[in-house]
Amino acid sequence: MAGRVITGVVADLFSWRVAIGTIGVLGILSMLVFRALLPPSRHFVPRRGLGFTHHRSALLRQFTRPGLPLLFLLGFVLMGSFVTLYNYIGYRLLAPPYRLSQTAIGAILSCI
Protein backbone atom coordinates (compact mmCIF):
# COMPACT_ATOMS: atom_id res chain seq x y z
CA MET A 1 0.00 0.00 0.00
CA ALA A 2 2.96 2.30 0.34
CA GLY A 3 3.16 2.40 -3.45
CA ARG A 4 -0.32 3.91 -3.67
CA VAL A 5 0.41 6.52 -1.00
CA ILE A 6 3.89 7.41 -2.30
CA THR A 7 2.72 7.72 -5.91
CA GLY A 8 -0.22 9.86 -4.80
CA VAL A 9 1.98 12.33 -2.95
CA VAL A 10 4.66 12.48 -5.66
CA ALA A 11 2.03 12.84 -8.41
CA ASP A 12 0.48 15.79 -6.57
CA LEU A 13 3.85 17.45 -6.08
CA PHE A 14 5.34 16.76 -9.53
CA SER A 15 3.64 14.56 -12.15
CA TRP A 16 2.52 10.99 -12.71
CA ARG A 17 5.69 10.29 -14.69
CA VAL A 18 7.87 11.28 -11.75
CA ALA A 19 5.66 9.16 -9.46
CA ILE A 20 6.15 6.07 -11.63
CA GLY A 21 9.89 6.73 -11.78
CA THR A 22 10.01 7.09 -8.00
CA ILE A 23 8.33 3.73 -7.50
CA GLY A 24 10.73 2.16 -10.00
CA VAL A 25 13.76 3.58 -8.19
CA LEU A 26 12.39 2.45 -4.81
CA GLY A 27 11.86 -1.04 -6.23
CA ILE A 28 15.45 -1.23 -7.48
CA LEU A 29 16.80 0.11 -4.17
CA SER A 30 14.78 -2.39 -2.15
CA MET A 31 16.06 -5.22 -4.37
CA LEU A 32 19.64 -4.11 -3.82
CA VAL A 33 19.14 -3.88 -0.05
CA PHE A 34 17.49 -7.31 0.01
CA ARG A 35 20.32 -8.81 -2.01
CA ALA A 36 22.95 -7.23 0.24
CA LEU A 37 21.26 -8.51 3.41
CA LEU A 38 20.58 -12.01 2.08
CA PRO A 39 22.76 -14.55 3.88
CA PRO A 40 25.11 -16.65 1.73
CA SER A 41 23.85 -20.02 0.57
CA ARG A 42 25.06 -23.00 2.59
CA HIS A 43 24.83 -26.67 1.65
CA PHE A 44 23.06 -25.96 -1.66
CA VAL A 45 23.21 -28.79 -4.17
CA PRO A 46 21.46 -28.25 -7.51
CA ARG A 47 19.18 -31.12 -8.60
CA ARG A 48 18.96 -32.41 -12.14
CA GLY A 49 15.68 -33.10 -13.88
CA LEU A 50 13.76 -30.13 -12.52
CA GLY A 51 13.55 -28.19 -15.76
CA PHE A 52 10.64 -26.62 -17.57
CA THR A 53 8.90 -29.89 -18.45
CA HIS A 54 8.92 -31.01 -14.82
CA HIS A 55 7.35 -27.77 -13.63
CA ARG A 56 4.82 -27.71 -16.47
CA SER A 57 3.63 -31.23 -15.73
CA ALA A 58 3.45 -30.50 -11.99
CA LEU A 59 1.30 -27.44 -12.71
CA LEU A 60 -0.99 -29.32 -15.09
CA ARG A 61 -1.45 -32.10 -12.49
CA GLN A 62 -3.08 -29.52 -10.22
CA PHE A 63 -5.92 -29.12 -12.71
CA THR A 64 -6.75 -32.83 -12.55
CA ARG A 65 -7.52 -32.72 -8.82
CA PRO A 66 -11.21 -32.28 -7.98
CA GLY A 67 -12.18 -28.84 -6.77
CA LEU A 68 -8.89 -27.10 -7.49
CA PRO A 69 -9.86 -25.66 -10.89
CA LEU A 70 -12.94 -24.07 -9.32
CA LEU A 71 -10.82 -22.72 -6.48
CA PHE A 72 -8.37 -21.22 -8.99
CA LEU A 73 -11.27 -19.67 -10.92
CA LEU A 74 -12.74 -18.23 -7.74
CA GLY A 75 -9.44 -16.61 -6.80
CA PHE A 76 -9.05 -15.22 -10.32
CA VAL A 77 -12.56 -13.70 -10.37
CA LEU A 78 -12.35 -12.25 -6.85
CA MET A 79 -8.91 -10.72 -7.39
CA GLY A 80 -9.94 -9.35 -10.77
CA SER A 81 -13.06 -7.78 -9.22
CA PHE A 82 -11.02 -6.21 -6.43
CA VAL A 83 -8.45 -4.72 -8.82
CA THR A 84 -11.19 -3.41 -11.12
CA LEU A 85 -13.03 -1.67 -8.28
CA TYR A 86 -9.80 -0.42 -6.74
CA ASN A 87 -8.81 1.29 -9.99
CA TYR A 88 -12.30 2.52 -10.86
CA ILE A 89 -12.83 4.17 -7.46
CA GLY A 90 -9.71 6.30 -7.98
CA TYR A 91 -11.10 7.74 -11.21
CA ARG A 92 -14.48 8.45 -9.62
CA LEU A 93 -12.88 10.24 -6.67
CA LEU A 94 -10.80 12.45 -9.00
CA ALA A 95 -13.89 13.61 -10.92
CA PRO A 96 -16.66 15.93 -9.75
CA PRO A 97 -18.37 16.11 -7.28
CA TYR A 98 -15.48 14.85 -5.10
CA ARG A 99 -12.41 16.28 -6.89
CA LEU A 100 -10.01 14.72 -4.39
CA SER A 101 -6.24 14.97 -4.79
CA GLN A 102 -4.04 11.98 -5.58
CA THR A 103 -2.69 12.16 -2.02
CA ALA A 104 -6.17 11.92 -0.51
CA ILE A 105 -7.15 9.08 -2.81
CA GLY A 106 -3.94 7.21 -1.98
CA ALA A 107 -4.67 7.63 1.73
CA ILE A 108 -8.25 6.41 1.34
CA LEU A 109 -7.34 3.41 -0.79
CA SER A 110 -4.52 2.36 1.51
CA CYS A 111 -7.17 1.74 4.19
CA ILE A 112 -9.12 -0.73 2.03
Image (cartoon, grey):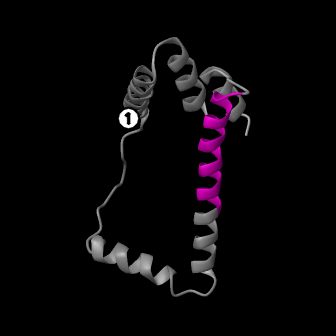
Question: Where is residue 27 drawn, in percent x and y?
Answer: 42, 31
**Residue at x 45%, y 24% (from the top left corner):** 16
Specify whether residue 110 is in view. Answer: no
Identity of the amino acid at label 1? Answer: Arg
**Residue at x 43%, y 22% (from the top left corner):** 22
The image quadrant that residue 107 belongs to is: top right
Residue 76 in the figure: left or right of residue 45? right
Q: Which residues are magenta?
A: 78-96
Q: Does residue 35 sit above or below 82 in this rendering?
A: above
**Which secondary structure lies at badge 1?**
helix
Per the picture, the main secondary structure of the magenta-coloured stretch is: helix
Q: How many marks?
A: 1
Q: Quadrant of the N terminus?
A: top right
Question: Where is residue 48 drawn, in percent x and y?
Answer: 26, 71
Question: Where is residue 3 drawn, in percent x and y?
Answer: 54, 31
Q: Does residue 42 sit above or below 12 in this rendering?
A: below
Residue bearing the label numbered 1: 35
Q: Does residue 88 sit above or below 74 in this rendering?
A: above
Q: Nearer the viewer, residue 41 or 73?
A: 73
Q: Is residue 90 magenta?
A: yes
Q: Nearer the viewer, residue 99 or 80?
A: 99
**Residue at x 66%, y 40% (from the top left corner):** 89
Question: Where is residue 110 drawn, in percent x and y?
Answer: 68, 33
Q: Does residue 94 sit above or below 14 in this rendering?
A: below
Residue 77 in the figure: left or right of residue 7? right
- Disc 1 crowd rating (10 Å Cα; few below 14, some 14-19, many 20+) is few
Specify whether residue 76 is in view. Answer: yes
The image quadrant that residue 25 belongs to is: top left
Residue at the front extreme? 96
